[in-house]
Image: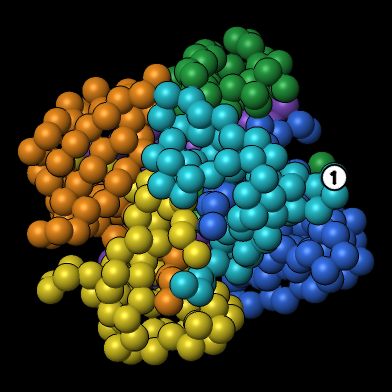
Chain colours: A orange, B yellow, C purple, D green, E blue, F cyan
Amino acid sequence: MKLSARNILPGKILAVTKGSTTAHVILELAPGLTITSSITNEAVDDLGLKVGDAVSAVIKAPDVIIGK
Amino acid sequence: MKLSARNILPGKILAVTKGSTTAHVILELAPGLTITSSITNEAVDDLGLKVGDAVSAVIKAPDVIIGK
Amino acid sequence: MKLSARNILPGKILAVTKGSTTAHVILELAPGLTITSSITNEAVDDLGLKVGDAVSAVIKAPDVIIGK
Amino acid sequence: MKLSARNILPGKILAVTKGSTTAHVILELAPGLTITSSITNEAVDDLGLKVGDAVSAVIKAPDVIIGK
Amino acid sequence: MKLSARNILPGKILAVTKGSTTAHVILELAPGLTITSSITNEAVDDLGLKVGDAVSAVIKAPDVIIGK
Amino acid sequence: MKLSARNILPGKILAVTKGSTTAHVILELAPGLTITSSITNEAVDDLGLKVGDAVSAVIKAPDVIIGK
């Protein structure tokens, strides 16, 4: 499936931490460049996410704030 | 100002394209890794955004979808 | 690609309207049930979106507000 | 109250699952078509959400990603 | 309609500016405290938004970043 | 850091409630006008957020729905 979201950044999972309903997943996009995602525990199970997986961070352009 | 948003990714502006009210800004986060932001034209003017500027992409963790 | 977003709703494109940088796309999810998406013009072109296409509406669970 | 959000989809609650601060609510929009919402536990209590309730899923157009 | 969104802030419209598909609306929440909303032109027309109108700014709790 | 987000509303923290991974923070923007933010527990710790702190609510314009 191809997505309208402008940003599909490939990375590798460094950590998966589940809470009671929400999980945090940390991806490495490039050496020293990580991004944190907050998704449902269900999504972690459905996708079988685990450390070392090759995945992508999908981000809509309006969700990217610029700071200067 | 320090932010609660988990992702503050430093980058350099590659392109700024204004529409009638909304602008698109492309940042380079690492060699070959770019991210596109959609912000208001006003924000482009207020921050004086232009090609080559060192800026950051600020992204909340719940706005990062994982694709596998 | 499988996504962490909880909602992947299949539909058919009823209309595509481009603005200067942002486009509106209307999908039919079920008879009489439509959903409107606002995406970049670039995404419309990249995906080659046109009336009649079978596509999906991808929506994160935190983006669904409940009204009662 | 009438809303600027372009999508107000009527449905019926199939399930409500509370976590420690966040709850997941599943709505049926049409036969076989469900949508999952992630809201605060407080919102579940304030609206008195329970299985069988007639409610609406309110979704902003920019929050609808298109996949093809 | 009662909403799961935690923030329903009453205000008065100070300005409405339409673009090609997207409009910007400025609300005054309290003396000297304004908030800017970006919605579709269609929403402006459907709600008949104009300067002086008493409206509310509806904001989900996850959409509020804290800066310190 | 200056932000592209159109809304930077100054306030004072009235309450901080941590869940298992997500926390809720209530700010007072003006007498009788509060706003609730949902952020990660990590963000609460990183920013050292506590009752009485002077902080800002940062909100993108597209995240402000208008209700009338």
Residue sitting at 50 percent across and 74 percent down?
A: F2
Badge 1 is on which residue? F32
C12 relative to D12 in the view: left or right: left
The quarter of the displayed image where residue F52 is located: top right
Instruction: Identify the image quadrant of the N terminus of chain C.
Output: top left
Point 64% across, 40% down: residue: F51
Where, quadrant-wise, is the C terminus of chain C in this rendering? top right
**In which quadrant of the rendered view does residue E20 lie?**
bottom right
Q: Which residue is found at the position 30% from the left and 46% from the top?
A: A36
Q: Quadrant of residue E60?
A: top right
Q: Position of residue D30 (x, y in %)?
A: 53, 24
Q: Nearer the viewer, residue C29 or F63?
A: F63
Instruction: In the rendered view, tell whether residue B40 sits above or below residue D9.
Output: below
State the image coordinates of residue A56 (x, y, percent, origin top left): 20, 49
Residue under the point 14% across and 31% down: A50
Q: Nearer the viewer, residue A21 or C44?
A: A21
